[in-house]
Amino acid sequence: MAAGASGRRRATGRRGGRLRALTRAAARGGGVAGGRGVDGRIRLLRFAFIVFLVLVGGKAVALASSSENLTRIALQQQTATVVLPAHRGAILDRNGRELAVGKPAQTVFATPYLLDDPQAAARTLCKALRITKKRERRALEKALAQPKSGFAYVARKIDPELAKAALALDLPGVGAYAEEERSYPMKGSAAQVLGFAGIDGNGLAGLEMEYDKQLAGVAGSEVIVRDPAGHALRTVRQTQPTSGASVRLTLDEDIQYTAEDVLEHTVRSSSATAATAIVMDPRSGEILAMANVPTVEDNDFGRTPAFNRNRCVTDIYEPGSIFKLVTISGALADGLVKPTTKFTLPSSLTLYDRTINESHARGTVTYSVREILQWSSNVGAVTIGMKMGKERLLKWMDAFGFAAPTGIDFPGEAAGIVPPADKWSGTSIVNIPMGQGIAVTPIQMAVAFSTVANSGVAVKPRLIAQLGDAVYGGMQKHRVISAKVARDVRSMLATAVAEGTGTKAQIPGYEVAGKTGTAEKPLPDGSGYSKTDYVASFIGMVPADHPRLVVLVAVDSPRTSIYGGDIAAPAVQKIMRFALQQLEIAP
């Protein structure tokens, strides 16, 4: 056994020796190539592992980014910011009656990409909302057939009951929110003064535009969470809107309505084109009525674009004989004449190529200044104007406020046209004293007569009595002529109504002072004056000794008569009579 064990140990030793010898030989010979192969495989493995890590990391980043986008999209689909419109302030008359006010309405909207069948949805909504016009139906179908659209209007500012019917259909993504619709309770009365607010609630004309910022207020907002069908689940955040301020005007609703009614009757009965009227308190400058006919029905300014303007403020015309008040007031103030100063007047007066005739043929007469105004003598007014001269006439036109805006609180006021001294032609000294060759606005003429009515003190006209909590009590005023000159002119104007051209303006129990006007209209091409188109006007004040009212009426292109005494004076009488009763002004 000892010998066998010893043999096995020798054999094992020989095998171990051979292994060690082979290892040493490999190290000396082929070991370099084998080692390089092992290192290459390790490096390749390492590179593959790094690439794998990069790919996995990139995918993780992409997934994370995609997740963020998906989260953002999901949040956008689940939340929405809704504007909460502010209540627009009301426009009131002087007594607090509503002339323009916001009434509750609903706007229905849709999320087109949530609708499975947009055409069917459009048909169903049209039926519920009573949309019958083909143009409106097609527009809705087109709006809903936008698969990527997230919002579309279905109907703006409709009756809340109709909106409720649309929501009852339970269509995915169809909702509604509260808005206001602008309403004008007087159905178009004073429309050109009030103006209107557009579909988005912005003032686009008249006082609605002039005071849009104050009326509009500040809109609020709320963030709501919606379910997949677009229905609101809860409100996350809310900012309440701030209501707009109300505006109280100087207009009297009843006097305004009466003035428009009288003008409409006057235009119809005389086959005229249009007419304007102003009722003013000469002591304060407050406008009690400012009427334009044709009116704008329901404040829908798209129907009659030619008459959308407040022509009392924005349009100019040649005033004709009512301007003689300025000529004679200036001559009296400069001491050139007295009410009793007499002039011998021929039947006509020719200067250069211009011949001045009277409105009614007569022979040579001797008239006092009072009679020149009483009978509205063109030859007499021109004679006094020539005695004054260009510089004095220009001075008094400037003093009475012509060729400059009155500053009334209304947008787009025209300044009128008075030719400067270097632009006068040879016949200007003939035309201007009787109110031709210049252009004025009705409000400028009303202010000029109010100056005489207010003992020679001009007061800036105004339409606003109160804005929010601020009451407008102050007056901007300045003296133009002396109280004595104003009193003398009022006395002459009273004679013109009592015995002269303005007798149709008389009111039993009251002494009315006033002046008629009949002005030729310039031809559009500037080549002269029309022989068929005139502006017939009358402006009066009452009571004559201490006027509380000044009323102007101007009628454009009447056909039954061209004279202010026939057409405009009766209209002034009717408006005055009502206003005296309305304001309880004693005789």
Image (cartoon, rainbow, N blue to C red):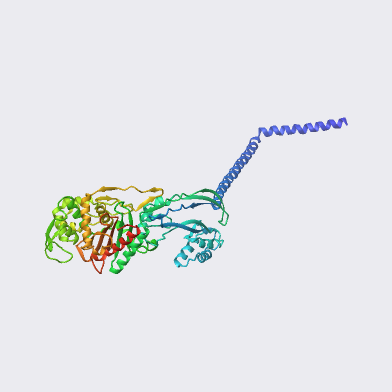
Which quarter shows the N terminus? top right
Q: Is residue 431 left or right of residue 542?
A: left
Look at the image and tell me whether residue 3 can be seen: yes
| Picture coordinates of residue 358, whole percent (x, y) | 16, 64
Visible in this render: residue 556? no
Q: Quadrant of residue 272?
A: bottom left
Depth order, front residue of 237/417: 417
Measured from the top left, where is residue 54 in percent x and y? 58, 43
The image shows residue 409 at horizontal and vertical percentages of 33, 52
Q: Is residue 205 left or right of residue 42?
A: left
The residue depicted at 72 percent of the width and 32 percent of the height is 21
- The image quadrant that residue 562 belongs to is bottom left
The image quadrant that residue 381 belongs to is: bottom left
Quarter of the image with the C terminus in it: bottom left
List the single residue furthest toward the right: 1
Of residues 351 and 220, the one drawn nearer to the viewer in this rendering? 351
Residue 103: horizontal and vertical position, in percent? 46, 58
Q: How many marks?
A: 0
Q: Residue at x 47, y 56 (%)?
A: 179
**In this orientation, which residue lies closer to the viewer: 155 or 580?**
580
